Image (tube, rainbow, N blue to C red):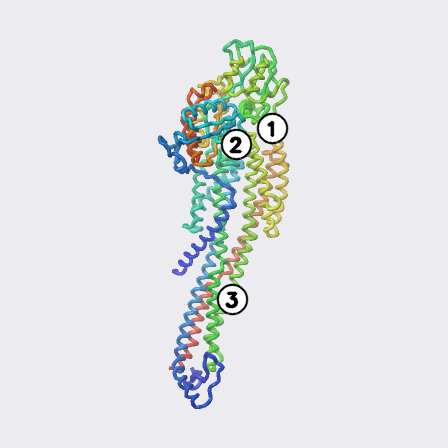
Amino acid sequence: MQIRRVASDCRTLLTASVIVALTLLAGCTTRGSSGTQAGVPAAAAGIGAGDRSGPGPGHIPSRPAQTAVSLSETGSTLLYPLFGDWASAYHHQFPNVSFTTAATGSGTGIAEASAGTADIGASDAFLSSGNLVANPGLLNIPLAIAAQQVNYNLPGLGPGVHVRLNGAVLAQIYRGQITTWNDRAIAKLNPGVSLPGIKIVPLHRAESSGDTFLFSSYLSTDDPLWNSTIGYGTTVAWPHAARARAEEGNDGMLAGCTAIPGCIAYIGISYLSQALKAGLGEAELQNAAGQFTLPAGPSLRAAVASFVPATPANETISMVNGPARTGYPIVNYEYAIVASRQRSAAKARDVKAFLHWAITAGNSARYLDRVRFEPLPAAVSSLADAQIARIR
Amino acid sequence: MTAVAPPGQAGVPQPRTPQTGTSQPPAGPEARQATQRRRRPRAAGTPAILRLLLIALTAGSVAWGVVGAWAVSQHASAADQVVTAIEPLSLDAQQMYRSLSDADVTATTSFLAGPPEPLGVRQHFEADIARAAADLAALRNSRAVAGSSPTAARIDAALAAISASLPVYTGYVTQAKTYSSLGYPLTGGSFMQVASEEMHLHLLPAARSVYAQVNAALAAESAQATGLPWIVVAVGLALAVGIALVRTQRWLRRRTHRTVNYGLLTATLAVAISAIWMVTAFAIARSDFEQGLGHGSSPAEALAQAGISAQQARGDEVLNLISRSGSTSFQQDFTAMRTRIGPGPGSLLDTAGASSPAGTSARAVAAAGHDASAWYAVASRVFKLDLASNYAAETQLVIGTGPGSSSRGFTRLESDIGRAIGADQIVFHQHATAGRGAFANLEAAVIVAALLMAAGAAWGLSRRLAEYR
């Protein structure tokens, strides 16, 4: 018995040492797996005065470093004006922080943030699983609530009148089955509104776009035929509609619609003020509960509120045509795409401090109202802070 | 007893020194005197030498018994550990890994097909999760990999991560199905993506780590079963005892003119037989384990990796269709997986093919290569349709089950790989069992031989010693 015990002890030692060697070898060949826990060393950040503990073990500094700091942002054109305002306000508050922002499109924002050529990628959409599997260190952190409206150019309509539309009718318009504004299907949704008999010119985006994704998603959830034949995506195979036109960017959609009476276009909410100023109308869209709503503060907040309790930790959630009774159907979060592993502790600190500022001070009406975004619900802010705390 | 010679005759030391054995007695009276002076202590010394030899040879025999039996028990228990503990564990780890990955593919595919979920698909998913959970429990309860080693710590950490992550994953899948069935397919789709991310970023890497660690333990334990140092020590000892026995017999023969000492002869035969038995058993076991690892375990491992990569590639097709983000990352990952799986130089299928034994396994690997190529052809049509935003046709090609569909291609590849792994595992198990069998009865044989040796040496030498009393 004694001998066996000694033998087994020796074997344990031997086996252990062989396994360690093999494991080290194996470690060199396995695909890089991500650190999945929020085990953020406090040393990376949280050294300045007035720091507060974020949720979890990570800390979120409340201010950037005292030394010269430069932060770069690129991506979504919808977020660009807001980022401009944020950047100047943040620079005003912390003069040592200089900010560069660029409107390059969400795809570029994601690509540059994942390549590390920009500190923050701005995106109208959360990351796809493909992006995450290719780059597991990326985070998508919501910054604000956004929405998409449907604008039209119907000069004869009285002031304060909003044409009511739903996904099924919009699908028929974009399929080329409804061609005039006084079509029975539209009239049925708009009792008492005298709709003109002019031709409908449906505009859609020429390039791959998050706006197309949101709009085609709404159509897909409301119209089974659209869903089974065209579907949703950042690009879709637009069906043949006689007067349909493709436009580049929200600018193009706005300019095109302003120029063409009878047009209809889907446009990001940060362009709503410009659209209204240009004389375009704003449609009331029917939500899943059957209510017609305009994209405004309460309807946006209501739409998002129904999803708040279910929001997963990584805050990837599609909220199109949700269950809220008074909610507007096409809502989304605007995201900052950030690498959880920054080049240096100093960079991590500065990125964290700014992002936390953006979802707190930066979420005030002073900044959001101009682009008609809505602040994040408190619970979503907490989840965002938990994600920010993971940056190191 | 009659054979015992009276002292002064055969028992009397001969006028030859046992050391040289060839020197002639010196002539002349001075020389004789000198010889007699030397004889007296020698006459007194022979019993002392015999006593010393008796003690030394008995001790040597016992030492051979202890060291030899110990070495055999070491190798035999390592071989037994491989066959009865670590090999099943490795199967559990591999099955857990594949079940998780399969659950992901099943869930995403069924989600894409839309509600209502067919009963069979739901059962398939639930069976995957149940199997993964059962394997997880088996792995957590197993103490086959030494509890305090760094490997065990790493395995424990990875298993704990899986335990924590599995309910999160199934929770997201449930959310996805719930939202989808309530009429919010986009929200459901985003939950499906989150679920899949949980799988690919947390669960699968942890499962892969468990599998790699257990396989490392399997290789280490197999190496231990046939490792060199102890067997060399034991055989060295046997050789030393054997030489001592032979030399003692030669010395005795010269001293006593007795040609055969049956006690010592028995001891010599016993050490020779047991040592040869040990070396032979060891050589057989070593060759068996090498065969098992080379032609069973290592192709099975390459195939398991190929299977997981195929599942990931299938996931790329399906998730690309769910997310429709416009990013080409899924297609890029599919291409990377395709290169990894093969066929092609350096690919997993080629690696497995090169080491697979002829027969079922080799045939299945060849079929896998064939089916993989056919599937890739369908997948490239899938990604072309995606580029053209023809989601309806793409969906049909991805989730349809008819001939020429991606599902069919993937399923065929999967089943080829599964068959090949099964065949390789049988090969490993057969070799490992044979290797373990080589050590059968050896420990007892060494002990019996050692006892025989000790008894033979003691008997043979004590008889000579008795002649001096």
Q: Is the N terminus of chain B in the top left, top right, bottom left or bottom right quadrant?
A: bottom left
Q: Earlier in the sequence, mark 1 or mark 3?
A: 3
Name the kind of residue labelled 3 in the image. Ile
* Camera-side residue of B426 and A379: A379
Output the chain of dot 3. B
Q: CA distance from mark 1 to mark 3?
A: 73 Å
Residue B145 in sight from this viewpoint: yes
In this rendering, position of residue B50 left or right of residue A275: left
In front: mark 1 or mark 3?
A: 1
Instruction: Look at the numbered discs 1 and 3 and tell me whether their residues touch, using CB distance below 8 Å.
Output: no
Which label number is shown at residue A112? 2
Query: Mark 3 Cα within 10 Å, few/some/many (few <14, many 20+)?
Result: some
Frontmost residue, A304 versus B118: A304
> Which element carries disc 2, helix, strand or loop?
helix
Please name the amino acid that badge 2 sits on.
Answer: Glu
User: Is residue B179 in view?
Assistant: no
Helix, strand or loop for disc 3: helix
Q: Residue at x 42, y 26 (%)?
A: A95
Q: In the image, which disc is placed on residue B276?
A: 3
Q: Distance of mark 1 from mark 2, alpha carbons? A: 25 Å
Q: Residues within 10 Å of mark 2 (few under 14, many from 20)?
A: many
**Label 3 – label 2 distance at C-alpha:** 69 Å
Query: Nearest the camera: B277 or A103?
Result: A103
**Which residue is identified by label 1?**
B389
